[in-house]
Amino acid sequence: MDYLPILVFGLFGLAFPWWLRHLKAFIIGNTLYGGERGELLANGGQFFKVYFTAGLIISAAGAVGGIAGVMIVKGGLSTAAIVMIAAPFYAGYIFAFAYIKANITNLVWNNCPIGPIRFRSTLEAFGLAKLYIANAVAIIASLGMLTPWAVIRTFKYRARHIEVMAIGPLTDFRGSDTSAVQAAGAEVAEFFDLDLSV
């Protein structure tokens, strides 16, 4: 058996949180407001902790699904049995995804000061998971017609859970030279459909 693909996938999985941290740090470090440059104070270990916990959630869901599968299959495999076996896997995946989104967003926003400005993000994994499930049901039931509604609903939820705080006088911001700002970066990101959001 060739273990190379497994090894490569495992190494990528271990390195991904640090890569993501460097990507976020690059974006924030190149964000300027009033001449003040952003800075990401969170470290790679904090990113890894979020992904490690999400991995434990998926593993636990898989274990529950596996145990349920063994118990159900003994009584005969039916459509209801298949649904009951698959449910823990899907629930675990959805919650793990929401956990990552909520905690990485909180970690980044809560650790990226810009001059006298600080941010406070309070996204919750359960709230985000319920939002994702409701959005998915609405989109499927409407054959995709409610996709814009789901997107706006998600943005509104995220906006309600972020605060901007000034820990110093806003006069600390100085004017910046906007004449040197080029639109090429934004246009290239749009062309390649890159997600450069924090």
Image: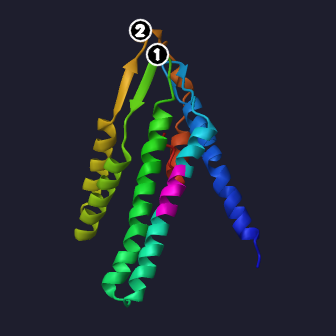
Instruction: Report the number of numbered marks.
Output: 2
Give the structural element (helix, strand or loop) at label 2.
loop
How far is disc 2 from disc 1 in space, using C-alphas?
7 Å
Please report contact status of discs 2 and 1: CB closer than 8 Å, yes or no. Answer: yes
Q: Residue at x 45, y 41 (%)?
A: 105
Magenta segment range? Answer: 53-60
Q: Nearer the viewer, residue 178 or 19?
A: 19
Q: Position of residue 187 (x, y in %)?
A: 51, 45
Q: Quadrant of the N terminus?
A: bottom right
Q: Position of residue 78 (x, y in %)?
A: 34, 88
Q: Residue at x 42, y 86 (%)?
A: 73
Residue where numbered disc 1 is placed: 116
Instruction: Classify residue 130 by image quadrant.
Output: bottom left
Q: Residue at x 39, y 82 (%)?
A: 72
Give the structural element (helix, strand or loop) at label 1.
loop
Task: Determine crowd level at label 1: few under 14, some 14-19, many 20+ residues with C-alpha closer than 10 A.
Answer: some
Task: Indicate which disc residue 169 carries.
Answer: 2
Q: Residue at x 53, y 24 (%)?
A: 179
Task: Indicate which disc residue 14 carries.
Answer: none
Instruction: Classify residue 150 by image quadrant.
Output: bottom left
- Residue type of the residue flagged with mark 1: Pro
- Residue type of the residue flagged with mark 2: Pro
First in sequence: mark 2 vs mark 1: 1
Confirm whether residue 30 shows in the render: no
Instruction: Classify residue 42 by image quadrant.
Output: top right
Is 120 on the left-hand or right-hand side of 34? left
Confirm whether residue 64 shows in the render: yes
